[in-house]
Amino acid sequence: MRFFSILLVLGATIVGLLWAAQYDYGPVVINQADEYRLVLRLGVPQPELIEPGIAMTKEFFGFELPVRIPFIRLPLIDEVLVFDKKIQYLNGAATEIEIAGNERIIVDYYALWKIESPLLFRRSFPGGTDQARNLIQRAVGAQVGDGIGNLTMSELLSRAEILETLNEKVTEELSSNGVRVIDVRINRTELPLPTEKATFEQMREQRRAISREKRAIGEREAREIRARADRDARELVAQARADGEVLRGEGDAEAAGIYAAAYGADIEFYSFVRSLEAYRKTLGENTTLVVSPDHEFFKFLDPSNAATPESPGTGAGI
Amino acid sequence: MAKKGGKKDAATEAGRGATGRIVNYLVLFASIAVLGAWAWQGVYNLKPGEAAVILRFGAFDRIQLTEGLAFHLPPPLESHHVVNTGQERSESFGARQTRTTEGTPADAEEAEISRKIERDAIQTADNNIVNVSYELQYKVGDAYAFRFSMADPAAILHDATEAAMRSVVGKRTIDAVLSQDRSAIQSEAQEVLEGLLLSYVQEVGHESAFKVGRINLKGQAPDEVREAFADVVSAGQDEKRSSLEATGDAREIMQVAQSEAAELREQAAAFKRSKIIEAKGEATRFEALLVEYRLAPEVTRQRLYLETMEEILPGVEKMVVEPNTVNMLPMLPLGGQRSPVGGTR
């Protein structure tokens, strides 16, 4: 019972100590996953606590120990400082930067940074994160200006990786401050108003050119289609006409054959009959016929002829 | 608490007799109460969609995903941090077309910059400006990375998405953004964004803090040039229309031509047929006449001649002139509508 009580009390004591450590009181120091801890013993920095867990050490008041024991914090003498281990977000102010070709562009960027060494950070920025933020903002801003100042507009737009080397440059610059810049990235670029207007004008011109071209293409296609149709149509009609001529020729030929066969029987009679036919066709109302009274047709107008039917007319002698 | 425990410790050593026993029990009871209260700190409850990150002595130990009551070693041995990983989240970009009227003289530059930041206009590779609006759908990925690797995860996600979208759109032409390439841009931006987010948690040794569902992109020509862009569309329609019209015309032309061709062929065929029929008819008639003629040549001939004359002469103006008066011919009324077809004789 007594032993149990002692054990219980001892356990409660340990728990109490750990509990206190959680709130940075008591003799044990526990570091959280997203934090650094730096212990200052009367202002003298002790080893930094980078990794999470209970702070361990091999040193005990100047002596080297064979095993690691928990770091014993001396109340009132040791001061525990906490730093954020997380990646910090820095929203760069949008700035207008002159780039190659005297063009100007407004660039908005962000930077991600984190504390790399708490001790160096504490030395540089006693005011803490806000103070660091100012310096980093200025350093990154300057590097962004330098980094893109000699690029052309198209280079700037087409290459996202431009700023990748910037991290290293800024980190180098700030390494003595215990800060590492993880990423600097442009998230927006904007053109100043005059440039923007010029760009809009240019865009409009481009679109107009495209519109005109499209309409012209349509016109050309239409003409081509019509011309082709015209050509085909003419061909078709000409072919039909040629075929027709052949048919007509055939008709004429065949008719001629028929006529020849028929009329060949008596050529002289044919020419007589055909002549009469021709007269019938050609002599009409608008014809003035000047005839001699001796003409065969008027033969019987002469009373001497009318009397004796001697000899009939000698055929068609008009 | 620690101080309290210390006091009781000292009291047990001094405790003797009845009062000591009471004190003993009191201490025991107090210790049990403290331990019980402490243990109770390790009990926690997870609602659907939530995950708990369990740290042991401040270091990552495990992620608890099953819902309901759960227990971990009480703090400060272990601690839990609840993150909602199931919830679908979304964030919209751009689409704010509020453009203030131009020409505010006081700190115009300042106003200009803030105005520009308000909308999401991106320069494309062909030096055009396109207005884009897009929506990011995401969930929290790794709860530990979300909670412990970034100070302001939402802001980082927002700006990283913008950077990714800008870098992808900046490599394309405006036509690609407005029409053809949209899904390609969406998936490429997603890839870039995932790469960025992963690179930010690299040193933590965890998965990405965000699980990107998809990015929905909508591109639009800026107001200032929208008319010109619309005209391109209507020009395209004009193009199609005029070629369609021409095709219609061509069809008509071909139909007309075909009908003309058919007509010509038919006419020719008709001509041929009629010629032949005519010839046959005439030939038959002639043959018939010839038969008759051969029976009585002189009579037939005379009859034919006279019949013809009878037929012709009534309509013909006749002038009977003595043969030796031929020289009076020029005085005939040859003018007017009289055609000299009849000729002399």
Image: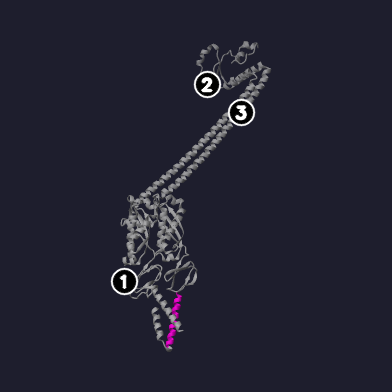
**Chain letter behind tag 3:** B
Tell me the residue that label 2 is attached to: B339
Query: Label 2 crowding class (10 Å Cα cut-off): few <14, some 14-19, many 20+?
Result: few
Question: Above or below — where is A126 with respect to A166?
Answer: below
Q: Do the residues labelled 1 and 2 touch (CB within 8 Å)?
A: no
Q: In this view, does B275 lie to the left or right of B228?
A: right
Q: Which amino acid does label 3 sit on?
A: Ser
Looking at the picture, tell me which residue is in the foreground, B335 or B173. Answer: B173
Q: Who's the residue at 50% across and 15% down the image? A: B330
Observer-side mark, 1 or 2, equals: 1
Q: Which amino acid does label 2 sit on?
A: Ser
**Alpha-carbon span between mark 1 and mark 2:** 143 Å
Quarter-of-image position of residue B307: top right
On the same chain, marks 1 and 3? The answer is no
Across and down, in percent, residue B234 comes to 45, 47
Query: Label 3 crowding class (10 Å Cα cut-off): few <14, some 14-19, many 20+?
Result: some
| Residues in magenta, as a range | B19-41
Tell me the residue that label 1 is attached to: A43
Looking at the picture, tell me which residue is in the foreground, B247 or A316. Answer: B247
Quarter-of-image position of residue A306: top right
Tell me the residue that label 3 is attached to: B274
Looking at the picture, tell me which residue is in the foreground, A174 or A265. Answer: A174
Q: Do the residues labelled 1 and 3 touch (CB within 8 Å)?
A: no
Question: Above or below — where is B140 with respect to B44?
Answer: above
Mark sitting on residue A175: none
